[in-house]
Amino acid sequence: MDFWRCGVAGWCLEVMFTSVDSILAGDFRLMGHTSLLMFPIYGLGAFAAPTAQFLDQWLSGLPGFEGAGTEAIPPLGRLIRHGLIYMVLIFTVEYVMGTCFKWLGICPWDYSMWPDQINGVIRLRFAPLWFATGLLFERITTGSIWKRSG
């Protein structure tokens, strides 16, 4: 069920984001768009919180991260750490899937014209967006971004 919720949430976010983008292009009809291919990619957000929880436990064994994965971490610290984890995970999935889609000739996005792009499949400018999107997926799947998931 979380896969479906994250997939639909991602679609909605993308349509809203591209609608705002249309305003910047001078189109005040607020026409947003997405691709059916994006649904399973956004659906993977269902695995974000369990992955962050696993990484919290893994980090707890490293110097400087002794409190990771425990309630000893203040909520804001956990929020920032998970947001960064989600941002990296989303960039990784976007890069891998974009590269595969480009190879198949079906990539629904092309960032090659932007100076902050990497191989035309990711834009570094989207880092804050992916940070927030990951936290949204955590909220959708766990009900909270302030307590430990699980």
Image (tube, helix red, strand yellow):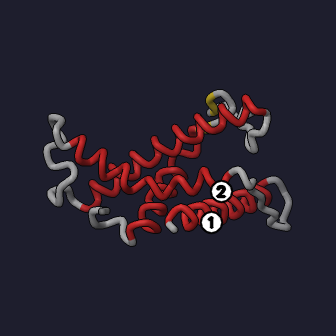
Mark 1, secondary structure of its residue: helix
Instruction: In the displayed orientation, state which residue is furthest to the front.
Output: 1
**Residue of label 2:** 39
Query: In the displayed structure, does residue 40 sit left or right of residue 92?
Result: right
Quadrant of res 112: top right
Q: Is residue 52 above or below residue 23?
A: above
Residues at marks 2 and 1 touching, judged by CB atoms closer than 8 Å: yes
Front residue of this view, candidates 135 and 103:
103
Query: In the displayed structure, does residue 80 sit left or right of residue 116?
Result: left
**Residue of label 1:** 8
Query: In the displayed structure, does residue 49 sit left or right of residue 128?
Result: left
Front residue of this view, candidates 80 and 23:
80
Residue 93 locus on image (x, y percent): 55, 41
Residue visible at 74% across and 38% down in the picture: 110
Residue visible at 59% across and 55% down in the picture: 42
Quadrant of res 73: bottom left
Q: Which mark is residue 23?
A: none
Residue 50 locus on image (x, y percent): 36, 54
